[in-house]
Every structure is written in C-alpha cells, then in structure tokens.
C-alpha cells in the first residue's frame, strides 16, 4: 500500500501512531513491510491457504463473534443434502462437469430455497442443453446458460438472486448448516499446512492469528486492505471470498474500523465499474441483457422482481436508466426501448477480444488510457492482436507502445511482424489530463470527488468527454434524416449536453445531472428510493442518485475534516446516499443497540422511531429492529429488521455462497496455474473451472517443471504508474527508477551466478526479457513442500517508448483467467533466470523455442538463426 | 563564552539577529524529518525539483544499485535525497532476547550489512536535505555574499551573485552544497525561501504524505521531536535518536534536523559534524604566531649571516 498508494498510506501511519498493529502479508519485503509491525513473506499464490487457516483458527478456537455470526451471516442456513464438498471429492465441489470444465450449481443452494418454480424464468441459451435440471439455475439471476457466455459476471453486483429464504438452525449444530460445513471444509487448513504450502512459520502464523482475533469482537474491529496482488489469480475472486468469510466470522463488516478495502489500481477504477466500462454491466451493476435470453424488459427483470432485498426494485432502476438515455422516446408502450440496449452474444472480455482479434472477428478497437502492449498479460499476444486489426484508435496522454508496436515493437525486431504487412490503421488522439478537465473521481471507498479544470489542454489534446460527445454528435449528424430503424437508437439518444469555451467542451456538470436523475417535474432526485418503474423518473446511474441532490454538486463538497464529524460527510459524496460504511446496520446488535460504546456508529432510536447515528443508516430509516416480514412480502419489505445485508436476497452476509460464483461456494486452495510445487490439499491441482487458452504464443508450464524452476511475481513501484505512459515519459520520475530490474535473493543469485547490477535473462514459454539484477535480502527463499522455493520479483512498468526504457515484465506472463471475472493470473507464475542479456532478433525466438522443447511443450516457432542457451 | 566566539561556533540563540536582522524578524524556521514514518515515496524529491525547476538527470539514467535509491546523494540538482538502507537485524520474533548492541556502525552495500546472521530485514528510509546550520561554513567562506542568512534563519545561495568559486563546497561539513556541472555555480536547498516569503510551507513538506517532513518554527519542532523520541523509546524503539537537534554540537545545531533509527553513519551522515570555520580564529592566531616566528627567524638569519661572513 505504501508502494502503490503512498498518499492513502498516511492513514495507515496515523492508525499506527494511535496504536494499531500493522501486519503486511506479501511475498516481497516492500516499502509497506518496512513500516509494518509484522511482515509475513509467503509464496505468491497461496493466500487462500493462509486465510483459510485463519478461518480455521477462528472456528476451531471458537473466537468468532457468535452473536453477530448467528444473527447476520448465513452460518445457520441449512444446505441441501446432495451438496458435496472438496473434502468429499478431492478438490471438487458437487456439480462439476469435467468435459465443459463448468459447475452446475444447483446443489450449492440452500435447502428448500428451490421449492417453488420461478415465474418468468429467463429464456435459455438454446445450445446449452440439459433443460430438465435448469429450472433452479435459471432463476439465479443469470443461470447456467450464461456460463457459456458471460457467466457469473452477468449476476451484477447483487449476486445471484435466490428463490426463497433458507431454513435456519440458530444453534449452529445441524450437520448441514453452513457453520458446520465451513468447519469441515477448512479443518485441514492448519498452521502446519501454512508452513508447508505458504512457507510461513507456525510462530509467525500464530502471531498473526492472535493479533487479528484479539482485535476483533464487540470492542474492537480489524480492517483488511488488499490490492491487485489478491485479485490477479486464477482464484482471484475466491481470495476476496476467503477474506469476506474471515471478516464476517469476526464481525468486522458494517462496523467502524472494519471492512475489506480494495485498493484499486488507478484513480477512478471504482468509477469505471460503477458507471461502467465493463462489457457485461450496465450502470449501477445492472447486468447487461443477453441477446437470446432477454427479449423484453419483463423477462429481463423477472428473475429479480420476485426476490427479496433492494435488487427487487431492479425494474425501477432499469426503466429510469432507459428514460435517461432515450427520454421522450422511451414509453411504456414501447417497453421503454429496452430493445435498443446492446446485448451480450458471448464473452466480450478483454482477453477474449484479443483472441477475437487474432482470429479476425474483431476488426476495430478503441484503447483509452490503456497500454496493453506493456500492461496486459502476455504482451506479445496483445500486440499480435493489435497488428491484425483494420483500425485502432489510441487515446492517451503520451505516445505509447500500443500505438507504436507496428514500427518498433519487439516482433519487428524478431522478424515475426513486418511493418509493411501490418494492416492496422492507427489513429493516435492525444488526451487531456485530469487537471485539464472537469469531472469526478470515484475512489475505492465509493467516494466521488469533483475536480475542476485548472488549465486548458495543450494542442490537440481533448478530454474523453469531449471526444465521445463530439464523436456521437458527428455520427448523429451523418445519420440525420435516416429512416433505417437501426439508426433510431442513436438518433433518439438524449445527446443534448451544453458545451462551453473555445474548445466546445461539453459540460461535465450536465452529465452529472443526467447521472443523478430527475423526477417528473424535472427537479433533481435526492435518493434512489424515489425511482419508479412507470417512466416518471429518469436516472443514469441509480446508485449515484443523490450526488446532485437539490441541484448542488455534492461531489464538490470540500469541508476540511477538522470542521466536521469523524465520518466527514461533507467531503465529497459517497454512493449510495452518501453512506460512508455499507451495511452499517450491522454496527448495532439485533435489538438496534451499539455492540459497544467504543464502536457505536448507527443505532435504533426507539423514541424517535428511527435509525440514527454518525453515518447515514444503510437501512430503511423507520424499519424497527422488531419488524418481521409478512408472508409474500417483496424486495426490501421481505427483509426483517435484523437483516443488515440489504442487497443480499436473504439479508445476510454469505459465509457460503449458494449462488453467484462459477468456481465454488467456498474458497479452496488451488495452486497457481504455473506452480513450482504440487497441491498438498487435494488431488485437484488448480482451479478446475479456470479458463486456459493453450495455443501458440500462449503456452503454459506444467507444475513443477524443472526447465522453469522459479516462481515470479509482478508488481508496481511507487515511482512509476502501471504501464508507464504517465511516468516513463516524465524526467523527474524516470530518473528515480531509470531501468527495468529484477529482485532476487542472495541465495538465488549464488545459485544462478547472478551479479548485483549485472544483467539477467528471464525466460518463460512465452518469451524472454532482460533486466538488471538487484540482489537483496528483501527477497527470501522459502521452504515449501520440503524444497527451497526462490521467487523473482519483476516490476512491470517498462517498454520501448519514453525516457526510461526496458523490456516489459508482462511479456513473460500467459493468459490464464479466473472463471468469475476473467482476471488474468499475473501475480504468480514460473520462469527460469540466467545471467547475461537476452538474445536479439530471431535468436530470441530460437532461445525461447529451445526452452519449450526441453520442457516438452509444443515448439511452435522453428528456430531460424542461432541456438538458444540451455 | 563570548558572543564573538559564537559567531563561528557554539550555541547561538538567534542566527538572524546575529546576521543583523531587526528584532521583529520572523522566528527561525526549519525542518524536522522524522525518518520513523518515512515510506520512501520520494514525493519530496519530485516536489522539490518541480517547484525549484531543477534539471532532471535523465541524460545519464542508470541504476545505482543502492537499494531503491537512484539519486545517490544531495547535489546541485537534487536538494532532497531519500536514502534507502537495507539491513538484516536480530530475529524480532524472539522478544525474550534483549537486543544486543554490537557497537559497530553497519555500513557497506545493501545486503552486506553487519549484524545478526539470519534475522529479519529492516529497510530504513530517510529524506536528507541541507541542514541550514546555525553556523554555516558555506556562508562564512563565500567571498561574494551570494550565500546569506535569511530573516527565517535559513541559508540561501543567490544564483545571480554566485561566481562559482566553489569555496563553499569543501566548507560544508555535510557535503551538501555542490557546483552544477555545465553551469559552474553552486546550488542547494533554499528551504523554499520564495514560498516562505508568501506564507507557504516548503514544497517537500507539503508533498510528504506521512508528515515525515515537518516544517515550522525551529523551537516548536525541537519540542515536538523531543516528545517523539521519548515516545519511541517508551515503545521500545531504543535506537531512535535525534540528529542535528543539539545546539551544543559542532555546527551549533541544525535548522533541519532528523529523527534517525540507527547511527548517523548508517544514513551516510557524519557522526560529529563540525563547522569547518570553527577553528578559524585560532587558526589565524596560529598563523599570526607562525608569521611572527617566521619573521623573527628571517631576521635572525640575516643577523646570523652577518656573523658568518666574518668567519675566515
């Protein structure tokens, strides 16, 4: 966190000054470790084993926050009889289809929750087959058929919708209740296992376990912070799930000082998932409709309309969105133009798109503030894709490798590509920086902070808002008068933003007003509960509704923290409804009283008959703790006054995820796809549902392969930003970290003959890169599975453009993906490392091919000149 | 102790008054750099170069191999410098063993520090800067008056007056002030004299995310530092020590002082800096004595020669 979020780290330092214990778990000793009380070096890719052992420690010592667990989590929920755990199936859960590598998730449901047939179940992807067993799955906000297309991503943020509430055993004794299932599932995740798998000593593990459990409960809370080191794995989503289980068991969710904080990789990545730029989501985590399933609005919302929790209002959110986009043209008679929304026809994720570029299906591409030729896994595959397009639009602050690959990319040097044969027409359009435009950042705490343009962008540089608005304007002008029905969605868009200044910059405030939404009188809405499904309200992003309440830009609020309460509601604006802690009903006990004076935050005021407290209560303000839903209640009315997790259909935090995940209802330790060792826990070595694409230019190393004996991990440095466009081009930053380097331990240096400040060639089945060597005690060999495991550290910022140049670490990585969100595994893989610089030109290909041959992998590239080193 | 003597060394309550500023001059301002909260982000270095328009050194981009430090030292173009020191220390997981002071400064390249055989790694980071000495030798030796004492008690070099003689460079006991290659003039931290004049804090202090660099009236900073070091000692951080805090030290105390977590040598700081002009009066006295001695001997030799000539 100190490395990549130094400004945010000031609050960690402040917490430390006030007595907090800072524990840093990371394969490397970083700047964060330097300031932490405890550093836990573990083997990259083994966090589920580590976190799972913490879960086991909590469960086996009875240190869970029992009242919280019974009342607020699904620990008492009883599971179906036919559910089988990884303990029963040697690493698989029930429902796995070995042929398609997909899970059929019906057996993961609560017992009894599948009793009633779903009305208006979504239609099915015709090719998926097996109709008979799909009724239940189809009701899950997406269902099985989507697994062939977008799968779990299509669930939106609400997770899967369940058909009913589970049967509960508050004593937690029922052998099939989640609590007991969890206990059995994690029973073998012991300190000894942690030592064996992660390379973390039992003493160190005990220290962490004691610190976390001693600091959780009624009086105290513990926060977990993570960044992409946790997410970029083939089990990335399950990492976060394990953390969620731990925090829910300890009662650390919805309470001050608790929670799980995702540190995002860029300034407004949270905003770009909220609004969003993801292919499978509409604004506010509404799933993108599917071409074959969602023929009309009713079919689309059917899976949610009957369910409990706030997602039960999805129709109001969708209709208001359609009204925001098509205004007067969206009416009840024409289904609010639901048919004009784009549709999913399959997976359109970034890596699938690269494969589609290679196969010629994808012919045009926009790259906006992204530099995949350096920043994405298997950079070569990315460039080969870009080189097979008809056209490519690149918008960035500086000229980047993704715009210049056709003249100076590594494939030009090796002869794999010839400039004159690349068909791609590249349009480079300079972009304005955040200081040159109005707009908002949404940070990881869902906090919107407005920024005002300080200066005019230089030369031809323009804001993204300018670019898309004028692009849309020009296209609409070209289409004006068209009678072709396919042009109507564009022509009827509410595309009337006022422009200002000599550059005709669209008003960002007008866009914010559309996002906030308005009522029938045209007045700004104040909260999303005002949204209606009858077409009387319009709202561009339902979760952002209220950001411009009373016509005032709340995101621009900047009252200093010393002039307001500790919650600081007058600094920026947090979605939803300016709540700073989500699910904060959980900060009070079931009766609505604070769990403790020390941790009081939101509570029930019986006299006023309202929820009150330091923050905006994340609960219906007047729903008393004693409220019990009447039979047949819908949406939020179906949740009791003791159900704090109001976006979940059962109002509870899910220790066990009965739906919504593609690779298991519980996390299990699987080895990274490329691992130096075997999996001691299960016969199943890796995530059975992961997505691999074994093909030329993307070959994988078998586990334990001695040709690629070392583990490596990639990361960022404080001095540079991601793929380098914003730092390698700046002299003051380039001079601080001028060259690509690798970090190795003195032991590995001795084993391979690497010299401090000398050169090293790091080789994988994909390619080889060269880096200067930093020998440092901060890298530690670990004892794992009876072997010494060396790890190589590789910052990934460099490429051939800019002031500070070098090979890109992402050249080394393969594309292998998590099945839930399709994130690549870039934090754990294997490689070889040898002294000296890498071969040049065609000799590089021969070098890599020779490695592949020795590893028994397909050769792919016939050697032309020279022979690769062994 | 006479005030005359303290012109060049020893405690001096008010260097600005000593330099002739009237009584209503502002209090002496300085930096307290608390390295125990430094995260090595180098924001101070970048903010300094941005504000002061210092040249980047991208012409000679090269890894130094000094951990994450690729700046190396304070120089004419780097007025802030973050040092990174990697150490192997005693096992911290064995709290029953009292820490052993080996009594040796740990020096040498990263990864080769003295200390315990197989222990925990410690990574020290510290942002170094001009010390703005109470007795600044650079200023004392400057023949052009380019270096001067400001009303804030800081020491500033005026680039339009400096003639590049370079006397100040060896005069500095810390090796801070430096001649810019290709320019010939001397440069160093001004403690953002231009910002101070406008009531702003120096760029580095403003940029520091963890308040490792604290700016303020020196008296206040010294009190704060004393409290901080006591606090750290109470928490068992025995190695915490202040550097440049003491007005009795060889430079009369620094305007920019530090809280360190190890001996100064470890950070590349001189353990006992002395203003190089401290001994100037006695040197002059010795020189005068010597000169008189030489004159007497010369005179005597002339007398002697007369005697010799008389010899047959």
Image (spheres, coloured by chain):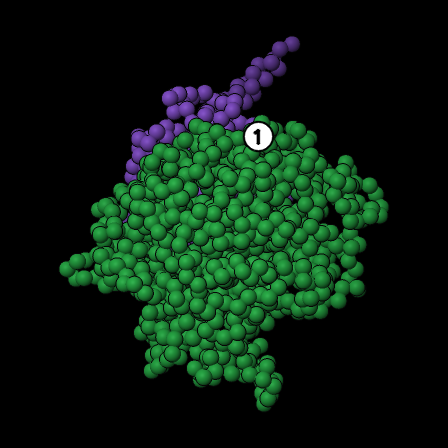
Chain colours: A green, B purple
Question: Where residue A700 sits in the image (x, y, percent)?
Answer: 68, 45
Residue closest to the far right: A865
Residue linked to disc 1:
A785
Q: Which residue is painted at 31% across and 60% down in the image?
A: A639
Q: Is residue B5 above or below residue A233?
A: above
Location of the N terminus of chain B by quadrant is top left
Q: Which residue is painted at 82% across and 48% down in the image?
A: A862
Q: Is residue A289 above or below residue A378?
A: below
Q: Which residue is painted at 71% across and 44% down in the image?
A: A765
Say which of A497 and A58 sits in front. Answer: A58
Q: Quadrant of residue A19?
A: top left
Say which of A414 and B194 sits in front. Answer: A414
Question: Where residue A255 sits in the image (x, y, percent)?
Answer: 31, 50
Q: Chain of mark 1?
A: A
Q: Quadrant of residue B112?
A: top right
Please state the total of marks drawn on the protein image: 1
Question: Where residue A458 sits in the image (x, y, percent)?
Answer: 56, 69
Residue B144 in view here: no
Location of the C terminus of chain B by quadrant is top right
Residue closest to the far left: A607
Residue A206 in view here: yes
């Amino acid at each position: 966190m100190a490395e990549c979020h130094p400004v945010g780290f000031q609050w960690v330092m402040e917490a430390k000054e006030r007595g907090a214990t800072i524990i840093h778990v990371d394969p490397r000793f970083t700047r964060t470790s330097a300031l932490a009380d405890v550093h836990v070096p573990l083997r990259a890719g083994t966090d589920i084993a580590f976190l799972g052992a913490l879960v086991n420690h909590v469960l086996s010592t009875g240190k869970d926050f029992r009242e919280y667990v019974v009342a607020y989590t699904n620990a008492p929920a009883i599971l179906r009889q036919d559910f089988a755990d990884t303990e029963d199936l040697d690493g698989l859960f029930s429902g796995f289809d070995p042929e398609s590598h997909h899970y059929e998730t019906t057996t993961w449901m609560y017992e009894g929750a599948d009793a009633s047939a779903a009305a208006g179940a979504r239609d099915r992807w015709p090719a998926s087959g097996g109709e008979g067993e799909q009724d239940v799955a189809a009701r899950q906000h997406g269902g099985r058929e989507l697994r062939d297309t977008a799968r779990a991503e299509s669930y939106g943020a609400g997770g899967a919708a369940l058909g009913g509430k589970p049967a509960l055993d508050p004593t937690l004794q029922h052998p099939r209740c989640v609590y007991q299932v969890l206990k059995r599932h994690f029973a073998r995740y012991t300190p000894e296992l942690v030592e064996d798998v992660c390379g973390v000593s039992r003493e160190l593990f005990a220290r962490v376990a004691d610190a976390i459990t001693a600091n959780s409960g009624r009086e105290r809370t513990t926060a977990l912070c993570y960044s992409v080191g946790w997410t970029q794995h083939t089990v990335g989503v399950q990492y976060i799930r394990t953390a969620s289980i731990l925090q829910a068991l300890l009662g650390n969710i919805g309470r001050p000082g608790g929670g799980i904080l995702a540190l995002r990789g860029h300034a407004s990545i949270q905003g770009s998932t909220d609004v969003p730029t993801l292919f499978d989501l509409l604004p506010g985590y509404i799933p993108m409709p599917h071409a074959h399933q969602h023929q009309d609005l009713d079919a689309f919302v059917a899976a949610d309309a009957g369910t409990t929790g706030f997602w039960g209002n999805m129709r109001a959110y969708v209709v208001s969105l359609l009204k925001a986009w098509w205004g007067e043209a969206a009416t009840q008679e024409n289904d609010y133009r639901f048919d004009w929304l784009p549709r999913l026809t399959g997976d359109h994720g970034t890596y699938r798109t690269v494969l589609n570029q290679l196969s010629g299906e994808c012919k045009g591409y926009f790259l906006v503030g992204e530099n995949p030729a350096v920043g994405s896994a298997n950079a070569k595959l990315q460039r080969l894709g870009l080189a097979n397009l008809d056209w490519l639009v690149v918008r960035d602050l500086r000229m980047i490798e993704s715009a210049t690959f056709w003249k100076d990319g590594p494939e030009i040097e090796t002869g794999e590509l010839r400039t004159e044969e690349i068909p791609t027409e590249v349009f480079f359009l300079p972009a304005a920086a955040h200081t040159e435009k109005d707009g908002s950042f949404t940070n990881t705490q869902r906090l919107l902070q407005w920024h005002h343009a300080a200066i005019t962008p230089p030369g031809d540089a323009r804001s993204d808002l300018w670019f898309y608005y004028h692009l849309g304007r020009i296209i609409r002008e070209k289409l004006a008068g068209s009678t072709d029905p396919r042009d109507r969605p564009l022509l009827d868009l509410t595309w009337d933003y006022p422009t200002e200044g000599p550059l005709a910059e669209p008003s960002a405030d007008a866009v914010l007003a559309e996002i906030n939404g308005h009522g029938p009188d045209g007045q700004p809405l104040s909260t999303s509960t005002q949204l209606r499904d009858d077409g009387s309200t319009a709202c561009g992003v339902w979760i952002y509704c209220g950001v411009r309440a009373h016509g005032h830009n709340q995101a621009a609020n900047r009252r200093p923290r010393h002039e307001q309460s500790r919650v600081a509601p007058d600094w920026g604006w947090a979605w939803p409804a300016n709540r700073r802690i989500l699910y904060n009903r959980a900060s009070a006990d079931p009766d609505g009283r604070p769990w403790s004076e020390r941790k009081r935050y939101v509570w029930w005021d019986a006299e006023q008959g309202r929820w009150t407290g330091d923050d905006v209560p994340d609960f219906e303000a007047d729903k008393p703790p004693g409220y019990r839903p009447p039979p047949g209640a819908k949406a939020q009315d179906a949740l009791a006054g003791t159900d704090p997790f109001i976006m979940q259909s059962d109002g509870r935090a899910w220790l066990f995820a009965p739906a919504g995940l593609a690779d298991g209802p519980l996390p299990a330790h699987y080895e990274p796809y490329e691992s130096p060792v075997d999996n001691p826990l299960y016969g199943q070595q890796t995530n059975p549902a992961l997505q691999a694409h074994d093909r030329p230019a993307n070959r994988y190393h078998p586990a334990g392969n001695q040709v690629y004996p070392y583990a490596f991990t990639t990361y960022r440095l404080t001095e540079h930003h991601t793929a380098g466009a914003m730092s390698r081009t700046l002299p003051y930053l380039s001079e601080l970290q001028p060259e690509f380097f690798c970090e190795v331990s003195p032991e590995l240096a001795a084993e391979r003959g690497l010299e401090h400040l000398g050169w090293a060639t790091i080789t994988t089945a994909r390619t080889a890169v060269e880096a200067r060597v930093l020998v440092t005690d901060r890298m530690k060999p670990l004892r794992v599975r009876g072997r010494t495991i060396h790890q190589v550290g590789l910052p990934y910022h460099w490429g051939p453009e800019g002031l500070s140049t070098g090979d890109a670490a992402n050249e080394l990585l393969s594309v292998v993906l998590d099945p839930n969100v399709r994130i690549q595994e870039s934090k754990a893989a294997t490689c070889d490392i040898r002294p000296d610089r890498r071969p040049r030109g065609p000799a590089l290909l021969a070098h890599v091919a020779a490695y592949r041959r020795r590893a028994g992998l397909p050769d792919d590239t016939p050697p032309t000149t020279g022979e690769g080193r062994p | 102790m006479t005030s005359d003597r303290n012109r060049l060394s020893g405690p001096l309550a008010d260097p600005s008054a000593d330099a002739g500023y009237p009584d209503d001059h502002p209090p002496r301002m300085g930096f307290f750099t608390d390295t125990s909260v430094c995260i090595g982000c180098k924001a101070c270095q970048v903010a300094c170069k941005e504000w002061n328009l210092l040249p980047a050194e991208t012409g000679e981009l090269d890894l130094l191999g000094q951990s994450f430090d690729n700046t190396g030292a304070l120089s004419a173009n780097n007025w802030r410098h973050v040092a990174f020191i990697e150490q192997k220390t005693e096992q911290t997981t064995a709290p029953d063993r009292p820490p052993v002071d080996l009594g040796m400064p740990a020096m040498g390249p990263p990864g080769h520090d003295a200390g315990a055989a197989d222990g925990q790694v410690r990574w020290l980071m510290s942002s170094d800067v001009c010390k703005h000495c109470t007795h600044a030798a650079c200023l004392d030796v400057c023949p052009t008056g380019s270096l001067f004492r400001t009303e804030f008690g800081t020491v500033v070099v005026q680039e339009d007056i400096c003639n590049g003689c370079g006397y100040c460079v060896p005069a500095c006991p810390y090796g801070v002030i430096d001649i810019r290659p290709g320019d010939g003039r001397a440069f160093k931290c001004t403690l953002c004299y231009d910002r101070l004049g406008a009531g702003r804090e120096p760029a580095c202090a403003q940029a520091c995310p963890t308040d490792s660099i604290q700016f303020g009236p020196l008296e206040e900073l010294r009190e704060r530092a004393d409290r901080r070091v006591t606090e750290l000692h109470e928490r068992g951080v025995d190695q915490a020590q202040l550097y440049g805090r003491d007005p009795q030290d060889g430079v009369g105390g620094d305007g920019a002082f530090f809280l360190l977590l190890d001996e100064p040598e470890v950070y590349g700081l001189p353990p006992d800096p002395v203003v190089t002009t401290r001994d100037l009066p006695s040197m002059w006295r010795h020189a005068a004595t010597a000169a008189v001695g030489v004159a007497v001997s010369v005179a005597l030799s002339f007398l002697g020669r007369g005697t010799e000539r008389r010899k047959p």
